[in-house]
């Protein structure tokens, strides 16, 4: 009990002990005792927790909003199964007494708990007349989860500032996240480490930068997906050229800190997909790049940029490879593609000829079934209007900005 009280005092949960105002109904409290056991059922810790009796709170008076978004169990179980199948290490973070970090949004007076000393100035007053004012949320209060979410959210937002973390907050801004690559593989700044070329040491935070950028890419910044995916390939042996590519992304972010996905409330709910595969996007290993983006109501909700694992022998073959992934939707999903040959093969079935004999028939069957079942509708779109180009190649500034705008990204001042 004393350890719990010390913890509460350290986090300044309790305010002063006062005479309970006449217009206030104080909240009750209770001590909860738990024996923590190990795998042998042996008691290893005696734990005491002071909780507020939130059932005595009155809505609209003692609390307003209580909702706090969480991950559902299905998603969590999927992550566990994925980690097991991929032989990955999982790490869990636990915030000790998390709720105690949330600030309250209303005045809460609580019954004085057992073990609490009453000040001498109030010693002559009956204990029932006094209460303790809470300065932070406490387990048991209706709004505690909400208050913790708000605190954590504010903290994380004050930290999405990775520019400062990597000393790039004052860097000159750039208009795109990467330079347009040279067709000459020997001049490509994103070529793998060459013999005799110096590999960066641990003093250069290359892996940390990639991790931070990937988090940003997966959450709110699809516009840097291709650049980050490309540079992540060199994590095992990065060179100064690759580190310059990382700093190029940072400089682009420096000039677009207010750019994000905008979901307008007047948009029409419609799921649309754009797909593209850039033939020999990785000329050094003869691999193509798959890119897709799905928009709902005109704004991106799902996207991906990934190097293909199979060797493509034509642009048509490269386009076909990425359709092997399952697509699930309750109504036909329109997928735009800029390769007429690919669309024709998908709609008409496998046609063996000199141009397609290198493509196994299995690449056609699954997507054709989706088309026949009216789950997918393939349509042609010109390359200049294919938003998936954003995820497969480095683009000139004008085209890059057009695609960024087309997937629903906006600057705050433009909203």
Image (spheres, rainbow, N blue to C red):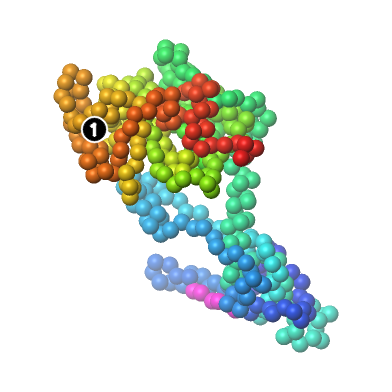
What is the quadrant of residue 97 in the picture? bottom right
369 left or right, relative to 123 = left
Residue segment shown in magenta: 30-35
Q: Is residue 324 above or below residue 241?
A: below
> How many numbered marks does the figure carry?
1
Residue placed at 42% from the left, 12% from the top? 184
Where's residue 292, x and y in %? 39, 34
What is the quadrant of residue 303 in the picture? top left
Residue placed at 50% from the left, 45% from the top? 267
Front-lying residue, 154 or 262 = 262
Q: Is residue 367 above or below residue 24?
A: above
Q: Quadrant of the N terminus?
A: bottom right
Residue placed at 28% from the left, 29% from the top? 343
Where's residue 69, x and y in %? 51, 58
81 left or right, relative to 129 = left
Q: Is residue 99 above or below residue 393?
A: below
215 left or right, relative to 333 = right
What is the quadrant of residue 76 in the picture? bottom left
Q: Is residue 213 magenta?
A: no
Front-lying residue, 360 or 130 = 360
Q: Quadrant of the C terminus?
A: top right
- Report the residue that reaches farthest toward the left: 352
Residue placed at 61% from the left, 78% from the top? 56
Is residue 193 shown to the viewer in this render?
no
Q: Is residue 33 magenta?
A: yes
Q: Which secondary structure dominates the residues rendered in magenta?
A: strand
Q: Which residue is mark 1?
A: 347
Q: Residues within 10 Å of mark 1 (few under 14, many from 20)?
A: some
73 left or right, relative to 134 = left
Where's residue 326, x and y in %? 29, 43
Where's residue 22, x and y in %? 76, 81
SS assignment at label 1:
helix
């Amino acid at each position: 009990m004393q350890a719990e009280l010390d913890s509460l005092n350290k986090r300044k949960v309790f305010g002063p002990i006062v005479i309970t105002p006449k217009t206030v109904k104080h909240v009750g409290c209770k001590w909860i005792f738990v024996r923590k056991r190990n795998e042998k059922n042996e008691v290893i810790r005696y734990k005491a927790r002071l909780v507020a009796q939130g059932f005595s709170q009155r809505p609209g008076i003692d609390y307003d909003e209580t909702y706090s978004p969480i991950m559902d169990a299905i998603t969590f179980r999927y992550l566990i199964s994925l980690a097991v199948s991929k032989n990955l290490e999982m790490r869990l973070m636990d915030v000790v007494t998390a709720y105690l970090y949330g600030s309250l949004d209303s005045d809460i007076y609580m019954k004085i708990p057992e073990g609490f000393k009453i000040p001498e100035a109030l010693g002559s007053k009956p204990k029932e007349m006094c209460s303790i004012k809470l300065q932070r949320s406490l387990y048991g209060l209706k709004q505690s989860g909400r208050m913790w979410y708000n605190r954590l959210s504010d903290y994380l937002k004050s930290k999405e500032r990775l520019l400062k973390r990597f000393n790039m907050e004052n860097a000159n801004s750039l208009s795109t996240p990467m330079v347009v690559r040279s067709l000459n593989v020997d001049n490509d700044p994103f070529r793998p480490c060459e013999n005799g070329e110096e590999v960066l040491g641990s003093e250069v935070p290359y892996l940390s930068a990639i991790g931070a950028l990937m988090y940003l890419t997966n959450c709110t910044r699809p516009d840097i997906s291709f650049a980050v995916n490309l540079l992540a390939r060199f994590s095992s042996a990065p060179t100064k050229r690759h580190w310059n590519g990382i700093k190029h992304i940072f400089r682009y972010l420096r000039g677009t800190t207010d750019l994000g996905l905008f979901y307008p409330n007047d948009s029409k709910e419609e799921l649309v997909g754009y797909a593209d595969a850039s033939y020999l996007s990785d000329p050094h290993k003869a691999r193509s790049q798959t890119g897709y983006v799905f928009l709902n109501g005109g704004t991106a909700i799902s996207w991906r940029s990934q190097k293909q694992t199979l060797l493509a022998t034509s642009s048509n073959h490269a386009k076909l490879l990425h359709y092997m992934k399952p697509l699930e939707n309750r109504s036909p999903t329109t997928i735009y593609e800029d390769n007429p040959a690919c669309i024709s093969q998908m709609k008409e079935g496998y046609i063996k000829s000199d141009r397609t004999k290198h493509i196994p028939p299995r690449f056609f069957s699954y997507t054709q079934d989706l088309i026949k079942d009216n789950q997918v509708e393939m349509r042609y779109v010109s390359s200049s209007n294919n938003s998936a180009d954003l995820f497969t190649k480095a683009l000139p500034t004008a085209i890059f900005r057009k695609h960024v705008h087309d997937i629903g990204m906006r600057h705050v001042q433009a909203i």
